[in-house]
Image (cartoon, rainbow, N blue to C red):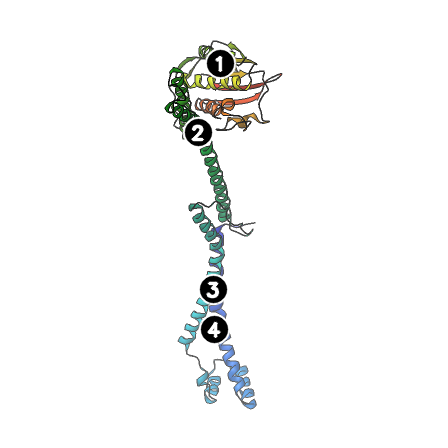
Amino acid sequence: MTTSLGTRIALSAIVISVVAALVAAFVPDYIYLIRDKLFLASLSAPDQQTLSRLLADHGQCSPQVQNFKLAHGFAPWRLNYNWALGALIALTAAICGALAIGSAQRIARPIAALADCARAVALGGREPPPPLSSSAPREIATLHRDFTTMVAALDAADNDVRLRSAAIAHELRTPLAVMRGRLIGAQAGVFAFDAAMLESLLRQITLVDQLVADLNLLAARQQGELRLEIEDVRLDQTARAVIEALRPEAEAGGATLIPEVAAITTRADPARIERALLNLVSNAIRYAPGSTIRLSVGSSGGRIVLAVSDTGPGWPVADPQALAGAFVRGDESRSRQSGGSGLGLAIVEAVARAHGGELQLSANQPRGARAEMILPAD
C-alpha cells in the first residue's frame, strides 16, 4: 500500500528527530565510558584494583575517585565539555543530514524524472515517463499516471492533426488540380474558354468553398462556438425541400426518394437542420445508387427523429458510429467522386449535438443503412 507524500515527509522528520534525540541521549555516555575504560587500561594492575574498589565503594563522581584519577595522570584524559558538546552536535548533524539527503533523494527522484520527461514533451517528444516503483508516494503515482495519459493524448492529437492535414491537402488538391489543368489547357488553346469551361471552374470553386465551410463548422463546434439562429422550424417542410433539391441527383443515380413526414414544428436553426438532412440524403444517394431512400420526420419517446434509410449495401464497417468522425471513410479506396470529403456525417453529428441531440447510425431492416438525427422536443 502506497503512502502519501505528506506522510513520508512527516515520517522522515520524525525519524530524524528520534535519531537526533538518541544521539544526544546516549552518545555522551558512550564517549565517557570509552574514555574511562581506556584510562583504566593504562594503569598498572594494582592501581586498576584500587580504582575498581574505590568506584565500588564511593561511586564515579566521589572525591576519592577523582583525587585518585588526578594523582595517577587523569588530567590529559579529561575532555573539555564544550569540545565534547561541539563534537556531539557535529556528529548529530552529520547523521541527520545523511538521513535527510537520502529521504529527499528518494522523494525527489521520480519528480525529477517527470520533470525531465516534461521538458522533452515541451520540445516535441512524446515518450511516456519511465515506470515508477511500487513504493512511490500516492501523489507522485497519481501525477505519473495523469502525465502518462496526457502524453498519450498529445501523441494521439499529433497523429490526428497529421492525418487531418493530409486529408485536407488531399481534398484541396483535387479541385485545384482540375482548375489548374483547365486553365493551362485554355491558355494553350487546347480548351475553349466557353460557358462549359466556366461552369466547370465554378463547380470546383464551390467544392473548395464547401470544404472550407465544413471545416469552419467543425472547428466552431469543437471550440464550443457554433452559433445557432434559433427559430420555429416546420421540419416536414424542410424535409420536403431537401427531397426536391436532391431529386434530380437521385434520379440520375437510379434512386427513388420517398418522404414520410409528419407535421412537426420545433425550435431549431433551419439552415443547419437543412444542411444536415442534405448531407444524410446525399450520402444515401452516393453510397446506395438505385435503392429506395426514405426521409422520415417523426417523434418517439418524447424526442424528434429525423431519419434517412436506404435499401443499398449497408454500412461498410461493423461499427457504423465510427464513420461520424471527420475525414473517416468506410472504404479508403473510394475516390473523391464516390466517397466525398469524409465530412458529411461529422457535420450532421455536430449539428445534432449543437441542438442538444445526437446522431445514431445503424443497419436498416431488412437491408441497407439507416441514419437518425435525434433532437429533443420542445
Tell me how far mark 4 sits from mark 1, CA to CA. Answer: 102 Å
> Circle 1: is it few (<14), some (14-19), or many (20+) Cα within 10 Å?
some
Residues tagged 3 and 1 counted as in contact (Cβ below 8 A): no
Q: Secondary structure at mark 4?
A: helix
Query: Which of the two discs, 3 and 2, sits closer to the camera?
Result: 2
Q: Secondary structure at mark 1?
A: helix
Q: Earlier in the sequence, mark 2 or mark 4?
A: 4
The residue drawn where x is 48% and y is 46% is: 143
Q: Camera-side residue: 120 or 214?
A: 214
Q: Which residue is mark 4?
A: 28
| Amino acid identity at mark 2 | Arg
> Circle 3: is it few (<14), some (14-19), or many (20+) Cα within 10 Å?
few
In percent of width and height, residue 277 lies at: 47, 17
In which quadrant will I find the C terminus?
top left
Q: Camera-side residue: 177 or 365?
A: 177
> Circle 4: is it few (<14), some (14-19), or many (20+) Cα within 10 Å?
some
Q: Secondary structure at mark 3?
A: helix
Q: Which residue is mark 2?
A: 173
Q: Which residue is mark 3?
A: 98
In percent of width and height, residue 245 lies at: 45, 12
Q: Which residue is mark 1?
A: 249
| Amino acid identity at mark 4 | Pro
In percent of width and height, residue 55 lies at: 53, 82
Tell me how far mark 3 sits from mark 4, CA to CA. Answer: 20 Å
| Amino acid identity at mark 3 | Ala
Query: Which of the two discs, 4 and 1, sits closer to the camera?
Result: 1
Q: Secondary structure at mark 2?
A: helix
Q: Is residue 164 above or below residue 85?
A: above
